Image (cartoon, rainbow, N blue to C red):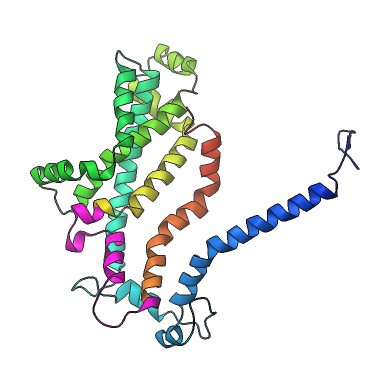
Amino acid sequence: MSRHPTGGIVRGGGPGTVALRVVLFAVLGVFCLYYLVPLFVMISTSVKSLEEIRNGTFLSWPRAITFDAWDKAWSGACVGVRCDGLQPYVWNSVMMAVPAVFLSTTLGALNGYALTKWRFRGADIIFALILFGAFIPFQVILLPMARTLGVMGLAGTVPGLILVHTVYGLAFTTLFFRNFFIGVSDGIVQAAKVDGAGFFGIFFRIVLPMSLPAIVVTVIWQFTQIWNDFLFGVSFTVGDSNPVTVALNNVVNTSTGVKEYNVDMAAAIIAGLPTLFVYVVAGAYFVRGLSAGAIKG
């Protein structure tokens, strides 16, 4: 037994409770190790030479660490007939993801704000139709979207891919912000209207600064979805406009020359580092955003 700071007595768990906790942590530890094995294989293989890979096993520790595979994956691996590595395709993904995240987040915030604080006749129907878009499979829209991009002259370009991700992401971003803005007091908006503030004045000066949790959740969600997307990238871009996910697939699935597993693993890690960085930096804010109600409802 132990004494609680408030003065009460707290009874500790018995031997059965302690044993249950030990077993629980042991099971969780096994699952954690099992989950981390592929990451260990990727990292260890990427810093080995081809000779060491051939003479050893994937689970063995590297005898001599070398970053030649990383250098080749970044600036020397062949993607089709172009042997510049993943570098230009990473920048394609950056130029695609940043504007698409910004546009879809901004438009989703405006939609959620209008649907909750400036309600109008048919708002619920419009929200239901927008929400329906979140459940439409990617494959269903490939043909009509390709036709639309062709008519607009954006087929096979990075701007065309920005438009695709912005439009397809609006259903999710609107849902996130709409559910968050429901919890914002209507009295604040009404008071601002009485003071003469308009639609955009209230949005930018009052509502948007209060919606940081929803913004963080939406940005992380959208960035992860857009950066990791392969289907839209392979369908709506060609050649030098491919995002990094398509380029990675072309590097790994090449059928000419010697199969360089270390380069493949290094390229895969490079392609995944931006999303990993976002989660490491903003992971705590993501959890706070979830608990603050960004995806409730």
Q: Give left or right: position of 104 versus 25.
A: left
Q: Is residue 6 magenta?
A: no
| Residue ID at (39%, 31%) | 175
Q: Give left or right: position of 25 versus 292.
A: right
Q: Is residue 236 magenta?
A: yes
Q: Position of residue 179 (x, y in %)?
A: 44, 27
Q: Position of residue 178 (x, y in %)?
A: 41, 27
Q: Position of residue 290 (x, y in %)?
A: 52, 37
Residue 136: quadrant of the picture: top left
| Residue ID at (36%, 36%) | 172
Q: Position of residue 279 (x, y in %)?
A: 49, 52
Residue 7: quadrant of the picture: top right
| Residue ID at (27%, 61%) | 246
| Residue ID at (31%, 60%) | 245
Give above or below for 265 relative to 16. Answer: below
Work out whether residue 32 or residue 226 is closer to the camera in this orientation and state it: 32
Work out whether residue 215 or residue 254 is closer to the camera in this orientation and state it: 254
Q: Give left or right: position of 136 versus 16.
A: left
Extent of the magenta region = 233-262
